[in-house]
Image (spheres, coloured by chain):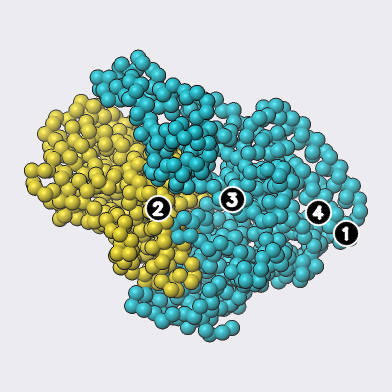
Amino acid sequence: MAIVTAPKKACAVNPLKVSQPIGGAFAFLGLRGAMPILHGSQGCTSFGLTLFVRHFKEAVPLQTTAMSEVTTVLGGYENVEQSILNIYNRTKPEIIGICSTGVTETNGDDVNAYIKLIRDRHPQLAKFPLVYLSTPDFKDAFQDGWEKTVARMVEVLVEAPAVETERDPAQVNVLPGCHLTPGDLDELRTILEDFGLKPSFLPDLAGSLDGHIPDEFTPTTIGGIGVDEVVSMGRAGWTIAIGAQMRRAAENMQAKAGVPFRLFERLCGLIPNDQFIAFLSEISERPIPSKYRRQRGQLADAMLDAHFHIAGRRLAIGAEPDLLFDVSSMLHEMGAQVTAAVTTTQSPVLERVKTNEVLIGDLEDLEELAKARACDLLITHSHGRQAAARLNIPFYRAGFPMFDRIGAGHQLSVGYRGTRDLIFDIANLIIADREENHQPTPDTWRSPMPACRSGRPQLY
Amino acid sequence: MTTTCAIAGGRKPRPAMGPATEGLRTKTSVKGREMGSLSATIQNIFNEPGCAKNANKSEAERKKGCTKQLQPGSAAGGCAFDGAKIALQPFTDVAHLVHGPIACEGNSWDNRGAASSGPSIWRTGLTTDMSETDIVFGGEKRLYKAIREILEKYNPAAIFVYQTCVPAMIGDDINAVCKAASRKFGKPVIPVNSPGFVGPKSLGCKLAGEALLEHVIGTEEPDHTTPYDINLIGEYNLSGELWQIKPLFDELGIRILSCISGDGKYREVASSHRARAAMMVCSKAMINVARKMEKRYGIPFFEGSFYGIQDSSDSLREIARLLVERGAPEDLIERTEAVIAREEARAWAAIEPYKPRFAGKRALLITGGVKSWSVVAALQEAGLDLIGTSVKKSTKEDKERIKELMGEHAHMIEDMMPREIYRMLKDAKADIMLSGGKSQFVALKAAMPWLDINQERYHAYMGYLGMVKLIEEIDKALFNPMWEQLRRTAPWDDKGNIRHLKAIAPTDPHAAEIALDHALAETTRRANKICLCKAVDFGTIEDAIRSRGLTSVEAVRQHTDAVGGCCKRRIEDILAAMPVSSPPALLQAAE
């Protein structure tokens, strides 16, 4: 069982953490015709926008209430009102999502009250979907912003079926954590449909940020789940939540519409997918399609081929809790040692990470631990590139942001097939590193026995 | 300094806190003091006499500042903190510490393409990552500790401390903390007072300049000086482009005493007051630095650009002229002319083969300020036809130069909505767009070539070599065989493909029926709304034009409900398409 600690330094160096409102806005990007707004100064939005654009290489709708020094002092009501009206009139969105920032939280803007007042003053907005989240920058992290926003969407938008007979057992809600990519969602959609199930994803980033080319220019999101479909999620037979962060949203769904849920904390690895596929077979009352029997075999074979390379690797991983738990557990199951683990925020899964200690810290902490503990595999988002260059160990990019490589939206980790490809990618990095940096020379074994890296055999 | 609260711009008295603002804010009196001095600095910047745009304003206008009031819900662009960081971060041996919650640094670090010839501390993300507790009790102690930690761990030449909105609101006095830390640790710790909410990026650049003028420039002496010492102001060495020009300086014996700030060192900028001349590179962002250095230290400056062949030559000539004026040996002018002649000849020879390929190709340029004309000149040199350039951030002077270059009828775009740009490209009114990264998808999603000419780009485009590189990149973009494939519709979306339509008939009878039945297709097409405000459909517009013989947008608007702003362009298009005999409905439906 891992102990979760936080370092006591005053200066965060090379942040791992992305701020909470960006996670909130990210969730809104999975709704069709959505326009997220950050209630703060325009820089808050501009930085977030740049992050999204560089990660997905897509146009991203994200607006700002453009708080100035004066309005920060006087209160932001007018800015919130103007931005909602402006967006409502100009871009014709289907939903507007608003996340607060450090500025407006310090100021104490009561946005829920503002929205009530705005609805009163502008009858055209009386029923218009407006969802507000309190997401101060100075608390929590990206994943928390996503978690709270999806939970709130369920609370505000989903409607319970009028009569129980309206419930459709084939309709399944999927609540994916923010660590899943649009590619992951498409993979899950295919799997569910192969069982004859009709999935609704909330949020559905695969509809908006998968890189498709729309026929017309759209200033809001170009796809995703429609508000009408979210409303009807209450009629589903089941909810599948992926990642511990989605428990809250799933519980809200159950409370609001009586939809039972099953939480899958992981979908990367053999056993988690066995459980997942078995569950789908159970709720759909269908046999496992032969496609998945074959894919399971392929994953097993990939594990056989890759374990030579991955076993014994000393992994340094920096990621948000659910991604960290999922990927590090999978590699642990392949024989790697989780030697250094750094995350951004608290989560119940952290103490179950297969290591002694999980640090809530930054990339400097991760780099120092990796160096001190002679790690030879690094997994974190693109900001780890400087550390990777200094450490000179294989570096696999995972998480958000991934701005210095393309295809971030289609990197897979879920399902038998996704796990298989992930294992290949990581093993190939290790092989390439061995060829480039660790070729034997006549002198490799001449020096006296080097200090044994791991000290003693690893206990699993 | 006063203790009453003065707010930049408005200067309204601070209101009593109502029940709606029961936030975490506590230390109100301190805030007043800090903001007072900042607002004075901002007023001072707004009075910049070196700025041509400013000089044309009335007294009252000037007080309002050089920034347009931001429109909530339709604003774009960075904040003042962003601007300050852009301007100063390229100093490579300086630690850049951001005092604020995680957002300001956590969401933005290591995201710019400046290049360093040595130190890497400038790329290290440093922030106090303020928590709720810091906001309640004040963040000054944490800031002081952070400074100490950085000095102990990295021992940089200096630390720049950036103020952000939240600590500015709660009254953290970074000036005092920096002063105390400088004294205690004997290292320069420089406050950069540019919290995001005081204005946009351009203001932040100037505030960064003020920090240099107040705390850095003139605090050290160079080891030696030469009559060939120059400063470059407002050059950030993006993609290492400074190094495309530096070999020419080296050849001429011209020394860059300090580059503010690309690949710059703290000691260089601290002793930059000993330069003989300065060039303000392609940006008015730091005009205050150039002008105040001229006033304080007698360093003459000119505004120049290294984008384009002609501009590069002009700039080299001007530098040589200024240096000779300030006492450098006169042969510098001759030597400069020789280098210019050689480089120009080489560049023209390299560009020549592209000219016939570019003939008749139309480019659309969406960028800011000076680049709106300096790049225009460059592209025209290569034979491209410029159909429009954005002038949103340009000064009157800039616009004059565009007119000079593009003629009286230059299409200057004040503020183009992404949707209009998309239309323009989709309708093939331009062959390529050049712009900054954020607008790239407008072009790419219209399946049109695009080239990045802003800060995140991969290639360097400065000087003679850079110009040739730019031309090569444009050529690669324009003539990529990929475009032809991408613009084709998929076989199953091609409404003229009868065989395919028959094939899909069993599964999608409605689509097949629509496509096969011309009349129904025409009805469907006519029922399409002409634009996103969805006020009116194609059929209505066409009927009005046909029955009443309308010829102008205004007339169409009078007779239909198409009154929205977005409808205008579509009506123009319909009018343009109408007089010629209508193409078969089937083709139009396939649009």
Where disc 3 sits, the SS reads loop
Q: How many marks overall?
A: 4
Earlier sequence position, callout 3 versus callout 4: 4
Determine which residue is flagged by label 2: A89
Tag on residue B319? 4
Which residue type does callout 1 highlight? Glu
Q: Residue furthest front?
A: B548
In three-dimensional space, the C-alpha distance between marks 2 and 3, rounded to whole angstroms, equals: 21 Å
Which residue type does callout 4 highlight? Ile
Determine which residue is flagged by label 3: B414
The N terminus of chain B lies in which quarter of the figure? bottom right
In the rendered image, residues at marks 4 and 1 fall on the same chain: yes
Q: Residue at x 74, y 30 (%)?
A: B352
In three-dimensional space, the C-alpha distance between marks 2 and 4, rounded to whole angstroms, equals: 52 Å
Image hue for chain B: cyan
Q: Nearer the viewer, mark 3 or mark 4?
A: 3
Chain letter tied to yellow: A
